[in-house]
C-alpha cells in the first residue's frame, strides 16, 4: 500500500488510481478526460450468399467498433449486490495476481462510480456476431410438378447464432447493458410452396 499514492482508507484489493500529475497525492487534480467514446466508431456488416445445385446458404454477420459503457451504471440494490463476474476471482491475499477489485458496497467506496468517476468500470462494446444463417433446399421440379406444385423450398434458419468476437465477454455487447436480457437465439424451419 505504501509503495504508491492512494486515497485515504484504501485497502488491499481496492482499485488503484493513477497519480497522473505525479505529485504523490491522489486527488481531483489527477482527473483527465477519457479518450473513449460512448457511441460506436463504426457499424459494419458482411453478407455471403453461396449456391450449389439445389442448395443456397446465406450468411450475415454484423458488428460494431469500439465504444465504452460503464458496466455498473444505475441502481442495483444495496449491500454486496454485484454481478456474478465480479463475485469470483477477485483480489485476496491468496489470489494476489488478480486485477479484479474486491467485493464492495456500490455506494460507499471511494472508488465507486458515484464517488470518483474512473475508467475501471468502462467496458468495450466492440463485437462481431454471426447474425443470420439460412440454408435453403429447392426440391427438384420433376418431383413437385407431379403433385401440382411449381416450386417448393425447404429451409432452416438461425438468428443470433454465434458471437464471433467480443472485446468483453461478461455481457452481451449488442445489448450493452448487463441489467438487460441478452439477445435471444432463434431457430426456424420452414417450407415454402408456390402453386
Ligand atoms: Ca496526483
Image (cartoon, rainbow, N blue to C red):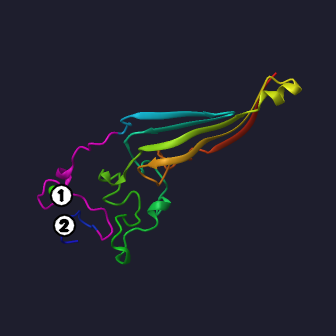
Q: Do the residues labelled 2 and 1 touch (CB within 8 Å)?
A: yes
The span shown in magenta is 11-37
Coordinates of residue 105 in the picture (x, y in percent):
41, 62
Q: Which residue lies furthest to the right in this view?
A: 147
**Callout 2: 10 Å neighbours few (<14), some, many (20+)?**
few
Name the residue furthest bottom. Answer: 94
Q: In this view, does 153 lie to the left or right of 168?
A: right
Query: Which secondary structure, mark 2?
Result: loop
Q: Which of marks 2 and 1 is nearer the N terminus?
A: 2
Q: In this view, does 122 lie to the left or right of 16?
A: right
Q: Is residue 123 left or right of residue 3?
A: right
Q: Is residue 55 magenta?
A: no
Q: Position of residue 87 (x, y in %)?
A: 46, 65
Where disc 1 sits, the SS reads loop
Residue at (31, 51) in percent of width and height:
119
Residue 175 makes an appearance in the image: no
| Image x and y of residue 30, in percent | 19, 52
- Residue at 46% x, 54% y is 169
Give the camera-side residue of 161 and 19. Answer: 161
When the figure is inspected, residue 15 is found, relative to residue 149, above or below; the finding is below
Residue in the picture at 35% in, 56% down: 112
Q: Name the residue under label 1.
A: 19
Q: Which residue was labeled with disc 2?
A: 4
Query: In the rendered view, would you say 25 is above or below 152?
Result: below
Q: Can residue 154 be seen in this view?
A: yes
Relative vertical location of residue 83 with respect to residue 41 in this rendering, above or below = below
88 vs 111: above or below: below
**Ligand 1 lies in which image quarter?**
bottom left
What residue is shown at x 83% (from left), y 30% (from top)? 143
**Ligand 1 under 8 Å from disc 1 Cβ:** yes
Amino acid at each position: 500500500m505504501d509503495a504508491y499514492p492512494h486515497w485515504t482508507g484504501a485497502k488491499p484489493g481496492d482499485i488503484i488510481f493513477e497519480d497522473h500529475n505525479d505529485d504523490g497525492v491522489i486527488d481531483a487534480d489527477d482527473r483527465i478526460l477519457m479518450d473513449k467514446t460512448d457511441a460506436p466508431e463504426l457499424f459494419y456488416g458482411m453478407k455471403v450468399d453461396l449456391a450449389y445445385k439445389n442448395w443456397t446458404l446465406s450468411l450475415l454477420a454484423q458488428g460494431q467498433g469500439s465504444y465504452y459503457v460503464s458496466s455498473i451504471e444505475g441502481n442495483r440494490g444495496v449491500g454486496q449486490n454485484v454481478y456474478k463476474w465480479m463475485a469470483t476471482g477477485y483480489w485476496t491475499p491468496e489470489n494476489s495476481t488478480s486485477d479484479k477489485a474486491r467485493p464492495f458496497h456500490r455506494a460507499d467506496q471511494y472508488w465507486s462510480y458515484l464517488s470518483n468517476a474512473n475508467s475501471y468500470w468502462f467496458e468495450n462494446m466492440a463485437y462481431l456476431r454471426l447474425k443470420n444463417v439460412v440454408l435453403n433446399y429447392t426440391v427438384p421440379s420433376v418431383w413437385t410438378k407431379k403433385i401440382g406444385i411449381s416450386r417448393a423450398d425447404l429451409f432452416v434458419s438461425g438468428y443470433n447464432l454465434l458471437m464471433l468476437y467480443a472485446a468483453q465477454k461478461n455481457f452481451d455487447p449488442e445489448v450493452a447493458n448487463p441489467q438487460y436480457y441478452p439477445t435471444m437465439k432463434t431457430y426456424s424451419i420452414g417450407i415454402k410452396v408456390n402453386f
